[in-house]
């Protein structure tokens, strides 16, 4: 089938590195959640179908049987036979199933609608990612606005239990009473040490230290 659009698209996917051939590479791609569509040959063994169903369940990916034999697929890729393959690109997977649905709507129509929805979501995420990377390169990083300082317009409310008494002026001294001694204890001790000491003379009189001239 030289003009088969399905085989032509599979050949382009293989050249682009978006197609894995064989059970082991397909299983690894499904376990890594990178597979977008698992494809089987129409004459694959029942064991291969069970493996494809297991891969599809573990990788949350759709699997389909192509209207091509193992020999036709092997001839396309230069092998003796190919029974299982997987696409890792959502756009290629949706395009392939759209072509299959155009050939057999009853068999591939629901799968085409399901893959088209997934492909649209994937493309939307890729566009958002590219736009975000472009904004980072151009320095258009969204900056969060600075938080506004909260100003309290209401005056502080004084609680009932907290009463602040106004400062009281010192009371004037009573008439006839002496002013309180403001000298400190240290000053009084210093005056006591520096005060001259007099020794009593005979008869208990103080000696003034002055002598009369004869």
Image (cartoon, rainbow, N blue to C red):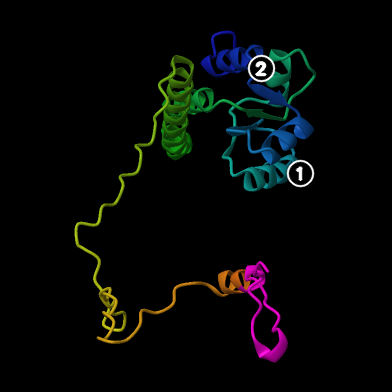
Residue at 40% in and 21% down = 140
Residue 50, percent across and down? 71, 46
- Whether residue 116 is visible to the viewer of this picture, yes or no, is yes
Which quadrant of the figure contains the N terminus? Answer: top right
Residue at 49% in and 72% down = 183
Q: Main secondary structure of the magenta part?
A: loop
- Compared with 137, 2 (above or below) is above
**Residue 33 or residue 185, whichever sits in front:** 185
- Whether residue 44 is visible to the viewer of this picture, yes or no, is no
- Compared with 58, 18 (above or below) is above
Q: What residue would you read off at disc 1?
A: 47
- Compared with 62, 211 (above or below) is below
Q: What residue would you read off at disc 2?
A: 17
Residue at the limit of the structure toward the top, as seen here: 2
Q: Is residue 114 magenta?
A: no
Residue 170, percent across and down? 29, 76
Image quarter of residue 69: top right
Please give left or right for residue 103 compared with residue 61 in the image: left
Q: Give the range drawn in magenta.
A: 192-214
- Compared with 42, 171 (above or below) is below
């Amino acid at each position: 089938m030289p003009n088969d659009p399905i085989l032509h698209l599979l050949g382009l996917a293989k050249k682009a590195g978006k197609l894995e051939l064989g059970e082991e590479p397909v299983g690894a791609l499904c376990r890594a959640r990178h597979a977008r569509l698992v494809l089987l040959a129409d004459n694959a063994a029942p064991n291969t179908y069970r493996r494809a169903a297991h891969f599809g369940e573990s990788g949350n990916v759709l699997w389909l049987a192509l209207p091509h034999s193992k020999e036709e697929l092997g001839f396309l890729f230069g092998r003796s036979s190919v029974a299982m393959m997987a696409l890792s690109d959502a756009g290629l997977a949706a395009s392939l199933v759209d072509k299959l649905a155009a050939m057999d709507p009853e068999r591939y129509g629901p799968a085409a609608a399901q893959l088209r929805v997934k492909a649209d979501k994937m493309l939307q995420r890729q566009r958002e990612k590219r736009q975000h990377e472009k904004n980072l390169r151009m320095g258009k990083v969204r900056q969060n606005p600075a938080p506004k300082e909260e100003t309290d317009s209401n005056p502080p409310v004084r609680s009932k239990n907290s009463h602040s008494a106004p400062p009281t002026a010192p009371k004037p001294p009573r008439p006839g009473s002496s002013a309180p001694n403001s000298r400190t204890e240290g000053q009084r001790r210093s005056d006591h040490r520096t005060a001259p000491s007099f020794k009593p003379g005979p008869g208990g009189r103080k000696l003034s230290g002055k002598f009369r001239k004869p």
